Amino acid sequence: MRGAALTLAALVALGARGAAGGCGVAEFACRGGPCVRADAYCDGEAQCADGSDEPAGCSVCNRTYYGRAGVAYSVALRGAPRAPFLCHLTFTAGGGAHGDLVQLAFDEFRVGRYEAGALDGCPDGYMQLSELGRPFTGGSWCGAADGAALYYSETATVTVSVKLFRARLGEPFGFRLRYKFLAQRDAIVRFGAVGAPLERGAVAPGTYCTRTYEECHRKRCRLQSPNYPGMYPRNVTCYWSLRQKDIPTCKHAMLSVRQDHSHKMQIKRSISMASLNKTGRAVRAWRECTGERDRLIFYDGASTDDPVLIEYCGGDWLPRVTSRGPEMLVAFHSSPFSAPPRPAAPAAPLRGFELDVDVVFADSDSLDYAREARRCEFHVKASSSEEETNATSAGGRGRRGRLHAPTHTLPPNTTCTWTFHGRPGDLVWIYFSSFTQYSLVEPKRVENGERDEEPTATLSPRPLLQAGGMRGGGAGLGGGCAVELRIWDGGGEGETGARPLGRYCDAAPALCARAALANATRSPRPCAPPDGYVSTAPLLTMAATSAPGTATHPLTFSLHYEFVDARLEGATLPLAESGGLSVEPPECSRRLTVPGLFASPRNALWFGRGGARRLRCLYRLETEGDRVELRLLAAAFGRSPRCTTRVDSVTGRLVCAPDPPEPGELRPSEAPFDGEEDDDLFRVPHLRIYESPWAGYRVPVACVCDNSTAPVTVSSGGPALELELVAGNLLAAEDQRHVHFRGEWARTAAPACAARRRLPPPGRTIHLDYPYNVNKMSECGETPFLLTARGNRSVFLRVWGEELSLAGAEAGAGAEGHCVTNNRVLVYDAHSARLVKAVCPGEQVGRTVHVFTPEWWARGASAGGAGGAAGGGRGAALLVVWAAREPGAATFTWMEVWRAGPGVNTSACAHPCEALGACMPGALWCDGRVDCPGGGDERGACGAGARLLAVLAAPAAAGAALAAGVVLTLGLLAVLAVRRARARDKRPLAALAAGRRLTDELLFDASRTSSSASS
């Protein structure tokens, strides 16, 4: 509906005239014609045929207009007025049925001309708006606008003033608007619904639009442009102060402002239909905010002296802007001159902008925000590793955790540093699971159809910095980096001893994106180096510099950090003293000489979570001739150990019994320790304890593989114990919290057992007793005997007693029931520490168990060089343990033997032992003791005369009488000895004479593949 609404008194007069002419109230009767609405009178357009509704001297200017709420009226200025020209149009909402607010829609606007960037942007004329009771801004609109531009008053009365100073030839003039009066309850876009009102802040007295917002965590705070949702006035400055006073205990408050919807983010620009098809959203900020543009400025604090977070002057959205603290100041400035906004037909979107306000709470001790206003520094300090020894969940800031980029917005040219302070002995390990940086300030795109109000050219936007900078140095395109990341091993740039680990210019560092996939049921492959960075000292520094600021160039990352406890007990144990074991990593071979507490390695990089597949550590507890007392305080071997610790029925010691392998599980043949292990036990984590009187030689004392056996007490018989922690197939989620041990040890006085029980070649006979008496060889308890051979010779051992089955013990069954004592003689291979034989000790005249070192069975092994030595240059050796549990005795004899050549021919031996098919040392030949089974070394030429000559050769100065007595005595003894030996060897010799085959109860057959037999 079109027409001019006059004053209330004029409407009454017109109503009276209409009634007189037969028209209704609020209607006007044309002369001789129909009735028209009263608001068509003097509206600038003739409705009556005779023009009686537009009498001479009629003008719409300098009038006050009223109307009913919800009814649209129109008014227009027709023709080009003569300059100078001044027209005031006042619109008043009378309240109640006449509305509370005024809506103006400018359907046609051609007033003067607009010169963008000029000191006086409207030199020929302009339109101004003012509201009753509000400060006059002095801003002006001029030029031409197509389509409808909307204006909503903040008060009940608004005045439109149109001024022309000069009229230029060919410059059109047109001014037509529609107005409507609205009830405040219907203005839900501005004020919100009745049940959910919006918080628009408290207006500062004497200002046009300065407001204060507080406690926005309880209310829906909105920052609205003046006269929202219509176009805002010109030459206006608003300050919106945001404050959060109510902060929960142990929390830190930050204020965040954003707007994601383009129809609520319109600052002095238009949106065409073509722009709705864009694939991206543009943001105009910083250098694009030239003098004639309207802008929003966000300050990181309560005043304009605080750092500027972003200067925003238009775009499809407003990215999130977050203050560092509980205060933020937002300033809005509109230019003095402009043409009315030009929305695209047919849809007329809202004019102006509305910003959402959120309050972000962070833990007061978190690393989500910088502590100081102008210094972006973060310090992460490690706690003691002992505090998390038994922890099973991911640690917080103490030993490990996760960091993100600062939650708040960083001003331009801000450098944030993160310094990780470890404790003495720590290393710092970091890796990124994500790293993203990109620019929101895009170049102007012509294809989107977007038009500016300013016809003149403006400064071109800053070119985008391309991604993919140079690692280790260099700069990005354009000679600078939008985002630069630097990492140092040490205290940072310029610090003494700092070593660069990486520099990245507009590029991501080394990433381990799979870490983001980890959850309670999924354990991805560990993020081990080179996916991350590890320092060599307890200090690591990282710095990130954002040149454009993070409001327009967001920087986000997720960084995992951990303080790795790299401390190791004791000193390095040389490889030569570790028996050639494949220790992995090599640093995990240690010697401990100072009694006290000790523990397994706590270096997470050595476990599955740090990328390691296996672990093998060797700890040697060593004293100077004393005895070691060990107490294993605690031990763990995974979250769900698949192994059981039990007492072996044969040896009486703790052994590990792993569960049967699951389908597809790593087979022992695939065990990774240089292929040297085929033990099924290496599938599961376990701890073995060894007695090791001599470096490189050891016998197992105990094995623990479950989480419930500790504490365990072990006493050595010699000066050293060794602990070997083995995990051959570490899981990805396992670390030092799941596989570890902890113990303490002390030294106690003891005789020099290690030297006493290292028996040199060529051999001897040993008698052992329990309880220990004057026999010094027996008092060293279970300290092993070391039997070694020279060169490439082999060791032959004969033990009196019955052999016990080892297969039953390995399967968990008991020993054979014919052993009447709990005492044992245990024989181990000296190089592999493998139990070779378990013997139930018996009388010296009973059965014997024979043992050879493994290389004896290698065909062609002879005395012709050292190439046949066992262990790749290590001589043949056996370890014998006298494990006495009750009163009893044991006897064994040993000697070194060798082959004279292929086969069992002993004719080339100077001193043959035909029962073994071997050569034996001359020092044992005819020494009065039977060393060769069957007594071959004490027969034949070993008569009484030979022994007499041997005896007499030494004391050459003895008297004749004494010599005669010695001869007589030795002769009698020799006769008795020979008769006893012949009686004992009667049956074997008869068998040999009859030509029978050698059996296990007879002599050894050199063709056998076993390393032992009984006789």
Image (cartoon, helix red, strand yellow):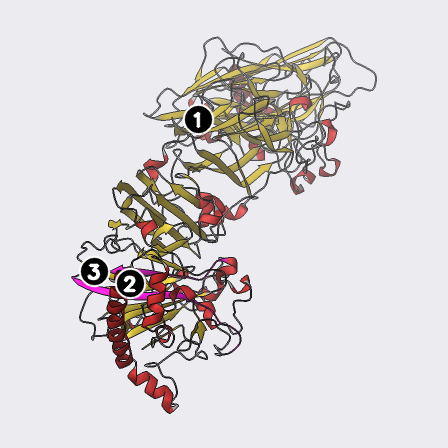
Instruction: Say which label, 2 or 1, has the lower sequence index.
Output: 1
Q: Position of residue 47 (x, y in %)?
A: 66, 27
Which portion, as a residue range, is magenta?
874-903
- Marks 3/1 in contact by CB < 8 Å: the verdict is no
Query: What is the residue that sits farthest to the right in this orientation?
Result: 169
Residue at 55% across, 66% down: 864
Q: Position of residue 50 (x, y in %)?
A: 70, 25
The amino acid type, in three-letter code, at marker 1 is: Cys
The amino acid type, in three-letter code, at marker 3 is: Asp
For residue 889: magenta? yes
User: Looking at the image, can residue 518 be seen?
Assistant: no
Foreground tag (2 vs 1): 2
Q: Is residue 636 above or below residue 485?
A: below
Q: Nearer the viewer, residue 757 or 63?
A: 757
Q: Nearer the viewer, residue 161 or 894?
A: 894
Which residue is disc 3 drawn over?
769
Q: Nearer the viewer, residue 673 or 891?
A: 891
Which residue is disc 1 drawn over?
221
Is 510 left, or right, of 221 in this rendering?
Answer: right
Position of the N terminus, as image quadrant, is top right
Instruction: Say which label, 3 or 1, has the lower sequence index.
Output: 1
Q: Is residue 456 above or below residue 626?
A: above
Q: Residues within 10 Å of mark 1 (few under 14, many from 20)?
A: many
**Between marks 3 and 1, how big is the CA–CA gap?**
94 Å
Position of the C terminus, as image quadrant, is bottom left
Numbered label tally:
3
Which residue is disc 2 drawn over?
963
Q: Is residue 17 above or below residue 831?
A: above
Query: What is the residue that sits farthest to the front in this orientation?
Result: 960
**Between marks 2 and 3, how big is the CA–CA gap?**
37 Å
